[in-house]
Image (spheres, grey):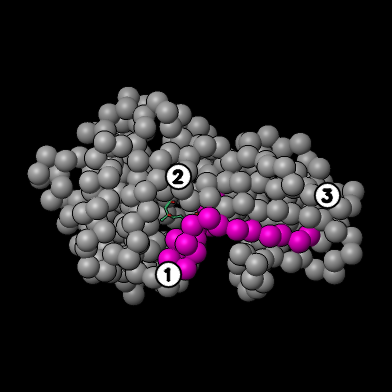
């Protein structure tokens, strides 16, 4: 087959119970279970066209040609699709994020989920969401979760993610406080490898993470925000404790990161309900009920070192879109 085309949209996700570390680096299987929330406001659209006239794969993000490691990861996913479809043509991949890439939020999750979906379609594969999720997971584990909307789990060593709960059944929102602009420090894949290799707290993280995941999952399934919030914060801080104990230490905190956390805790002390989480970067994501989101958003905007606050509802499944 030649000239196949596919286009797909996928939303980013933020883990409420974190994944950090691999059980199998070669197959990219995770060492711990994770559970995430898909975000409506952070979206990637990707189109893939296989073309017999191309001498190599091409990948552009927001119209700019991408090379180096990000490009190689795209080629690896395309190779997997070609192998499955019995295809030899190269592909042109065009990707656009509808959120500020410069803010350092560009997540591999929505990107690889949209790519997996678009490339399978372009290659003529009749892939199920599970198959797309497995393809995305091999490229970046968090991307497996972006194939589904709402609350999504990826069990330890799982090939693909699973839907836990529809967003409408437990409609929370997330505020993303962008604290420092520019590209992030150590990429997740490198950071977790370094933590696994050097942190004496990594085994403790792997031992503890399943019970925190179970608490997060139970709280989601029972729509219990008071139980969910503390477990979400615990998961993020446990993960960061393992990073801080690596040698040399992996420190993703910026001064404004701590300012946002402090503000969220003060919000709770004055009777509000909101909980923070953070990933391999200095930005803070705050889980909040819709009724309190506008007030907290304004408060976070006032903090020194916070450049942007994005507000997002829970997002839907990734999907194919017409050309
Ligand atoms: C801190 O999925 O980006 O965001 O599988 O190596 O591509 P690779 O890593 P990635 O790691 C995400 C780590 C995290 C927590 C999470 O999303 O669960």
Q: Position of residue 203 (x, y in %)?
A: 35, 54
Decide: is 125 above or below 170: below
| Local secondary structure at mark 2 | strand
Q: Earlier in the sequence, mark 3 or mark 1?
A: 3
Q: CA distance from mark 2 to mark 1?
A: 20 Å
Report crowding for label 2: few under 14, some 14 to 19, many 20 or more residues within 10 A (C-alpha): many
* Corner quadrant of residue 220: top left
Is 98 contained in the magenta span?
Answer: yes
Residue that label 3 marks: 4
Nearer to the camera, 223 or 236: 223
Residue occupying image coordinates x 89% and y 60%: 52
Report crowding for label 3: few under 14, some 14 to 19, many 20 or more residues within 10 A (C-alpha): some
Q: Is residue 274 left or right of residue 248?
A: left
Q: Position of residue 241 (x, y in %)?
A: 27, 59
Residue that label 2 marks: 39
Q: Is residue 173 visible?
A: yes
What label does residue 184 carry, if any?
A: 1
Q: CA distance from mark 3 to mark 1?
A: 35 Å
Residue occupying image coordinates x 41% and y 48%: 14
Report crowding for label 1: few under 14, some 14 to 19, many 20 or more residues within 10 A (C-alpha): some
Q: Position of residue 255 (x, y in %)?
A: 23, 69
Viewer-side label of 3, 1:
3
Looking at the image, do the residues carrying marks 3 and 1 touch, with CB atoms under 8 Å apart? no
Residue stretch rendered in magenta on the structure: 91-110
Residue occupying image coordinates x 47% and y 62%: 100
Q: CA distance from mark 2 to mark 3?
A: 29 Å
Ligand 1 contact, mark 3 (Cβ < 8 Å): no
Q: Is residue 159 visible?
A: no
Nearer to the camera, 55 or 194: 55
Nearer to the camera, 144 or 180: 180
- Give the farthest residue toward the left: 270
């Amino acid at each position: 087959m030649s000239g196949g085309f596919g286009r797909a949209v996928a939303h980013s996700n933020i883990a409420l119970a974190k994944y950090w570390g691999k059980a199998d680096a070669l197959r990219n299987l995770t060492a711990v279970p994770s559970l995430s929330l898909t975000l409506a406001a952070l979206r990637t659209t990707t189109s893939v066209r296989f073309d017999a006239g191309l001498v190599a794969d091409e990948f552009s993000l927001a119209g700019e040609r991408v090379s180096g490691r990000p490009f190689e990861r795209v080629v690896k996913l395309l190779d997997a699709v070609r192998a499955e479809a019995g295809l030899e043509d190269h592909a042109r991949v065009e990707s656009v994020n509808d959120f500020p890439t410069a803010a350092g939020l560009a997540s591999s999750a929505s990107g690889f989920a949209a790519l997996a979906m678009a490339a399978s379609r372009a290659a003529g594969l009749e892939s199920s969401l599970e198959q797309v999720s497995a393809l995305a997971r091999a490229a970046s584990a968090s991307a497996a979760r972006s194939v589904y909307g709402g609350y999504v789990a990826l069990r330890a060593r799982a090939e693909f993610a699973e839907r836990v709960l529809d967003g409408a059944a437990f409609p929370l929102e997330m505020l993303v406080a962008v604290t420092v602009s520019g590209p992030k420090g150590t990429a997740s894949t490198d950071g977790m490898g370094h933590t696994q290799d050097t942190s004496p707290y990594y085994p403790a993280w792997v031992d503890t993470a399943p019970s925190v995941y179970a608490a997060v999952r139970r709280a989601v399934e029972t729509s219990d925000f008071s139980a969910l919030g503390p477990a979400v914060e615990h998961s993020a801080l446990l993960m960061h404790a393992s990073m801080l104990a690596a040698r040399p230490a992996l420190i993703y905190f910026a001064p404004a990161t701590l300012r946002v956390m402090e503000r969220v805790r003060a919000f709770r002390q004055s009777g509000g309900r909101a909980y923070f989480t953070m990933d391999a970067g200095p930005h803070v994501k705050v889980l909040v009920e819709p009724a309190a989101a506008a007030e907290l958003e304004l408060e976070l905007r006032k903090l020194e070192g916070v450049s942007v606050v994005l507000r997002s509802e829970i997002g839907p499944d990734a999907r194919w879109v017409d050309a």
